[in-house]
Amino acid sequence: MLNLSIHLNSTNSTNLTDYSTLGSCKWTGPPRQWFILNAIGLMPPLLTILCNACNLVVFRAWHKKEPYVLFHVHLAFSSLMYGGVTVLAPLGRLIRPRLPIQWMQGVAMQAGMVAHFLCFFSAAVISTDRWLSVEFPRFYQVQATKPKILRVIACICGITLVCTIPGVIVWNKCLVFFCFRAPAFLCEDRTIDLHVVLKGPFFIWALFLGQARIVMIAAQIAIRVVRKRRTIVSLAIVDQAGHPATPPPVTGLVWSTLLPGMAIVGASLMSNIPQFVTSANKILRRMTFLEGDTSFMLVFVFFQHVASPFIYILFFRSYRNALKRMLRDLLKWSRTRFRRRILRFDY
């Protein structure tokens, strides 16, 4: 998926829908360099698959999940799907170097665009969900049930298909295939870039404003707590046992459940803002160097999908507990198997 050399931009290319016009691809450099180039291209999709498969396994082992965790499960599944389809592009070049498999290239780009939109949309919904949980806590506790959240997830999938499938069908005509790099949509009317630019303000502002409001509410709660501690002397900071007093329930809710979602949303912003800026500059005909190979931008896109397990481990206590329990059970099972083999060997 990634391109490490500028001179690869001038390699053989053809329209993906016209198979007969494609000639044989010839690599002028050392064979080892070609293999390393494509092997490195496999790393981001494989890491995405590994990280999100780990997320789904931990979520499966997580008992008594709160309903909002289903949004994170959906995001992990969407990222897993994104990694699974984008891995086809470098595989198509590795399996058949002379004439890379075109249907694999097409699926990687078209299905990858749908999966990426789904992940971006899911992150925006997570941001909105966390904002509602602190802006209207009582209403949220009553309304945020598992069936309703599942219906919201179904709506996310439906809206994603409506917003992406027509574009995938139309832009298939301007999907260009390259011998030694990822395919690209090269439409003369810039509709693909316009699609990125138009969806950007909606999702990016939903992410940004939701997080800003959450931080504002958390700051207001913290200020109220400080004022209460200063004015009410009768409430001691340290209880009779000598331990610090527990924070108010609302403060605990803000920092225990919102930090993972806020970190996921932050990773989504870091992944999508560079793509938004690049597409906007292409439409405005600025930064002419962006007319060449921009496959290096995929590094930012994959960051959102790979960072999630590390974010959950850092900020999700329940996720850590489920992971510890799963590893402990796995260790116990391996010890039992090892002891049985030792006993069989002794006899």
Image: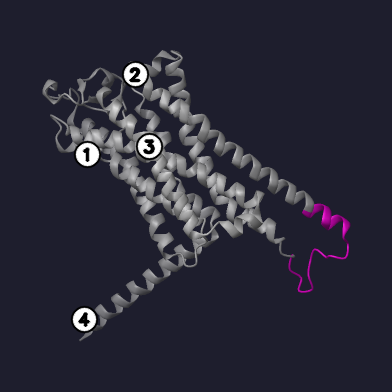
Quick one: label 4 or label 3, which is nearer the N terminus? 3
Tell me what residue is drawn at x 21 percent, y 81 percent: 345
> Which is closer to the viewer, label 3 or label 2?
3
| Alpha-carbon span between mark 1 and mark 4 | 44 Å
Residue behind mark 3 = 162
Quick one: label 1 or label 4, which is nearer the N terminus? 1
Q: Residue 292: which numbered mark, if any?
A: 2
> Which is closer to the viewer, label 4 or label 3?
3
The range drawn in magenta is: 225-244
| Alpha-carbon span between mark 4 and mark 3 | 62 Å
- Mark 3 secondary-structure assignment: helix
For the residue pair 106 and 297, the one nearer the viewer reads as 106
| Residue type, mark 3 in image | Val
| Alpha-carbon span between mark 3 and mark 2 | 30 Å
With respect to residue 280, does 334 lie above or below? below
Residue 215 is covered by the magenta coloring: no
| Alpha-carbon span between mark 3 and mark 1 | 29 Å
- Is the C-beta separation of discs 2 and 4 under 8 Å? no
| Residue type, mark 1 in image | Leu
Residue behind mark 1 = 91
For the residue pair 334 and 276, the one nearer the viewer reads as 276
Quick one: label 3 or label 2, which is nearer the N terminus? 3
> Is disc 3 surrounded by few (<14), some (14 to 19) or many (20+) residues within 10 Å?
few
Quick one: label 2 or label 1, which is nearer the N terminus? 1
